[in-house]
Amino acid sequence: MATAQAHTETKWWSGGKSPFNVEYGKLMMWYFLMSDAFTFGAFLISYGTIRFSQNYWPDPNEVFNAFPLAGHANLPLAFVSLMTFILIVSSVTMVLAVHAGHNMDKKGVIKWMIWTVIGGIAFLACQAWEWTHLITGDHAVMINGQIENIGTTVTMNPWGPAANVAAHDGHHVGTPGPVAFGGYFFGITGFHGFHVASGVGINIVMLIMAINGTFERKGHYWMIEKAGLYWHFVDLVWVFVFLCFYLI
Amino acid sequence: MEHAVQEITFHHEPGGKEVVSKIIRTTVILSVITIIELGMGLGMYALPMAAGLKLFLKGVIVILSLAKAFYIVGVFMHLGEEVKNLIMTIVVPLLLFIWFIAAFLYEGNSWKNLRNTYNPKQAVSAPAAPHEAGEHH
């Protein structure tokens, strides 16, 4: 509470002190993340614009209903929920690593950074499975009077409204969905996955530096804090990717 | 080190167990919100419901996601503990999103309406040139 008192009474702009009360690197990380938020925001808003301009858009519950090793069981949103919880948990282990760093607890930082890296890799593995399943998972679709089997790619996808025919084996036959669906899905989740991958890389570097005692010699763990900001941002973006592609 | 000390006038106290319990509380909040969102998403799929109710549920899910964002930024990223000057330089520019979202979604919707009501025959016959004879020089 003493610091809160000091904050309100301080004349931040009268000179002699840093008006933002943070170190340069951390401030720049915040501004980088703000600009990155605009990049992601532009992508998601563009997706929203195209989706609003279409008369038909695929139902995410029908597109994302597969789970590894579950065969053809209809499990809408199950796998993506798992991915969401993996990312939330890895965000929690990251904040615990930052907390351990505040207390100069080297062992704690190493332990929680290892869990964070594992969480990041687990998320990427899930995404790789999901992409593979979408690209290779064929569905019967009526194209120019012919029934063809197509997967979800950036040029075509089988998620259009149902056609008025049934295949000879009794399966549903669809029509091609809006072309933009695949492009936006792979583009935006891919850009997010790229952020996760670079975050894992940064976290591994931080882990190695913590093990080598670099931060202990410096006398602070501020680098962990900055890596943490980036990692939480990745989790934050997933909240909105999850919202726009899977929930609504 | 010397340089960095000047950049930070007031250091945060490291904090102990109460910080960990705050982290755990936030984790529980985030998980519960996510489960509620998933329940609503699945409800829209599994139960037959009117378009208006669906739209309402989607609005609720959006608001819940914003709450999640608030907790991640405020607690996990510790923005809530920073100086007000810093908070404002991050948060105020993001208000531009309100306009971006409203303008672009309106644009998308208008695009759909124009395409649905477009009548090619009418468009071709409309611009009749009044002085065709006078075109020759």
Image (cartoon, coloured by chain):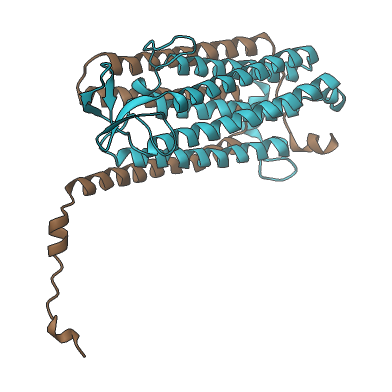
Chain colours: A cyan, B brown
Relative horizontal placement of residue A111, taking residue A197 as reference (left or right): right
Instruction: Give the camera-side residue of B33 and A142.
Output: A142
- Look at 15% across and 68% down and name the residue there: B127
Relative horizontal placement of residue A127, taking residue A61 as reference (left or right): right
- Asked whether residue A21 appears in the rendered view, the answer is no
- Look at 59% across and 38% down and name the residue there: B85
Q: What is the x, y in percent for residue B96?
A: 45, 44
- Asked whether residue A43 appears in the rendered view, the answer is yes
- Look at 52% across and 15% down and name the residue there: A85
Instruction: Give the camera-side residue of A185 and A237.
Output: A185
Q: What is the x, y in percent for residue B115?
A: 23, 48
Quadrant of the frame with the C terminus of chain A: top left
Quadrant of the frame with the N terminus of chain A: top right
Relative to A224, is A35 above or below?
below
Within the image, what quadrant is residue B83 found in? top right
- Look at 30% across and 42% down and name the residue there: A53
Within the image, what quadrant is residue A26 found in? top right
Relative to B35, is A23 above or below?
below
Q: What is the x, y in percent for residue A215?
A: 82, 25
